[in-house]
Image: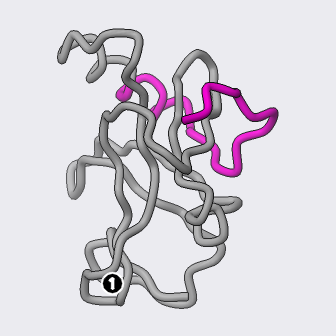
Amino acid sequence: MSNTIEAVAPVTLTEGAKKEIKKLMSQQELDESFGLRLGVEGGGCSGMSYVLGFDQTKEGDSEYSIDGIKVFMHKAHGLYLAGMQVDFQQGLNARGFVFNNPNANSTCGCGTSFSV
């Protein structure tokens, strides 16, 4: 496992996403070993789904710091997530995290699944 923090994160978090992530981390009373895991997994209606949750570092992870938020991402997932922006919306029609991924050729209606 590597505790080296990489220089530049391949993803960005909007102010709304950072605020919500920090709030959720505080509510769950997570210790310093936890960070935000961003990744992908097979499945979903378009072929791949996003992974977003709190976790500890694992073998093969890169670690980034985005405005004080530790972000863990498996090195192999960078190909699918490079340039992605994670936002948090609190509108009347939808509330939750939104993934704006320039690598996605298509996405599903719910926005949590994509294909490349």
Q: Nearer the viewer, residue 2 or 27?
A: 2
Q: Residue 101: x, y in percent?
A: 57, 68
Residue 44, image x and y in percent?
A: 25, 81
Position of the N terminus, as image quadrant, is top right
Left-right relation of 22 to 65: left
Q: Is residue 110 magenta?
A: no
Which residue shows up at 38% across the image and 64% down it? 50
- Describe the element under mark 1 as helix, strand or loop: loop
Image: magenta residue range: 1-21
Point 32% across, 69% down: residue = 112
Looking at the image, residue 55 lies above or below residue 46: above
9 or 12: nearer the viewer: 9
**Residue indicated by mark 1:** 108
Q: Quadrant of residue 8?
A: top right
Viewer-nearest residue: 55 or 45: 55
Q: Amino acid at mark 1?
A: Cys
Identity of the residue drawn at 44% across and 41% down: 58
Question: Is 38 situated above or below 103?
Answer: above
Q: Is residue 53 left or right of residue 66?
A: left
Q: How many marks?
A: 1
Quadrant location of residue 47?
bottom left
Left or right: where 75 falls relative to 69 = right
Which residue is outermost to the right? 7
The local crowd at label 1, few if under 14, some if 14 to 19, many if 20 or more residues have their Cα within 10 Å, is some
Does 31 sit above or below residue 36? above
Q: Tell me the quarter of the picture where residue 14 sits.
A: top right
The C terminus appears in which quarter of the rendering? bottom right
